[in-house]
Image (spheres, rainbow, N blue to C red):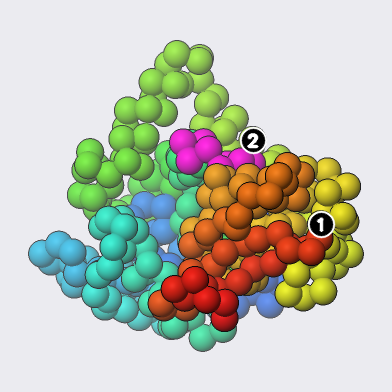
Amino acid sequence: MPVRLPETAAALELRHAVRDWLSRYAPTGVVAVGLSGGADSLALTAAAVVEAEVVDALIVDHGLQSGSDAVAAEAAAAARALGCRTARVLAVTVTGGGGLEAAARRARYTALDAARDRLPVLLGHTLDDQAETVLLGLARGSGPRSVQGMAPYADPWGRPLLGVRRATTRQLCADLGLRPHEDPHNSAPEFTRVRLRTEVLPLLEEVLGGGVAAALARTGEQLRADGEVLDELAGKLLRAAGDGATLKIETLATAPVAVRRRAVRAWLLDGGAKALTDKHLRAVDALVTDWHGQGGVAIGGGVAGTRLVAAREHGRLTLMALTGGRHH
C-alpha cells in the first residue's frame, strides 16, 4: 500500500502536478520513475504512488563516488516503503567523451530505456531545472529550438514537475520525514549547470527583482508551443518540396525562412546529419536563397569513413556521402 501523504501545500501541489500529467500522457496509470534518491525524484515518487495505478522505481548507480551502491540501495528501500511495485538498481559504467556530465547522462538514459519495459519513465525535473536548461540554450544561440527547454513528455520521458519549484519537492520530503541524498556533484562548481544554479540565477533574481526562473520556464513553454506549429508547417513544406532524396529549390525558396530552415533541418537529420549548428543551417539555406555558384556544405554525420555534403544541383538540394571526394 502507498504511504498516505499529509495534506500539506507541498503534497497537494505535487499530487496535482502528477495527476494532470497522468491524465494527459499516461491514462493507464502504469509508469516507471527514475529515482536518484535526491529530493526531486523522491518527492515525485511519493506523489506518483498515490496518483498512479502502478509505479516501478528505477535507480541508476553511476559508480562515480565511493558508497554509491549504498546510496542506490537506500533509494530502492525508500521506493518500496513509499509503495512502488518494484525497485531495481541499475549499475552503469560512465565512459565516453563530452565531459563527465554528458557521459553520465548518456549512461543513465540508456540504462533507464533498457529497463523500463515499455513504460513511460517519470523524471524529477522541476521548474528550476527548466530555467537552467533555457539559460543553457540561450548560451548555445541555436535559435528558438535551443531555448524551448524540456518537454513535459518526449516518449518515453515524462516530466510532471516542470511547473513545481525545487523548494516544494524539498518541503514534501520534510513533510514525509524523508532524508534525500545530497549528490556532491550538484554543488561542484566545475559543472556549468551548478554555477547557473548557485551563482547566475540567484544574481538574476536579485538584479531583476524576482520571478526570473518562472519567466524563463514560461518562455520555454511558449516557444515550444510555437515550435510545434512551425514543425507542422515544415512537414508540409517537406512533402511539397521533396521526392525523398532531394528537395526542390523553387518550392523551398518561396517559403517563410522559419519554416524553410526547419524543413531543411529535418531533411538533414533524416539523411544522417549529426550535431547540426546554426552555422550549418545558414550555409545550407544560402544554397537556396543566396546561391552564386558556391560549393557544397560539409555536415557532420554519415557512416564511418564518409562525410555528408549538402549541395545544389539542377535546381534541387542534394545530400551526399563522400569518401575521398567520391559520391556514395
Q: Dot 2: what SS? A: helix
- In the rendered structure, find residue 249 and report the number of the disc placed on it: 1
For marks 2 and 1, give the one nearer the viewer. 1
3D distance between C-alphas at marks 2 and 1: 34 Å
* Nearer to the camera, 37 or 84: 37
Query: Which residue is pictured at 46% across the width and 36% down the height?
Result: 139
Residue 149 picture location, percent across and down: 56, 47
**Residue 79 lies in the magenta stretch:** no
Q: Is residue 113 left or right of residue 281?
A: left
Which of the 4 image quadrants contains residue 273?
A: bottom right
Q: Position of residue 107 (x, y in %)?
A: 34, 71
Tell me which numbered mark, 2 or 1, is placed earlier along the sequence. 2
The quadrant holding residue 114 is: bottom left
Task: Provide the residue designation for mark 2.
Answer: 219
Left or right of 292: which side holds 46? Answer: left
Residue in the image at 49% along x and 62% along y: 300
- Residue 269 sits above or below residue 80 on the image: above
Quadrant in the picture for residue 78: bottom left
Q: Secondary structure at mark 1?
A: helix
- Residue 170 seen in the figure: yes
Nearest the camera: 5 or 60?
60
Highlighted magenta segment, given as a residue range: 138-147
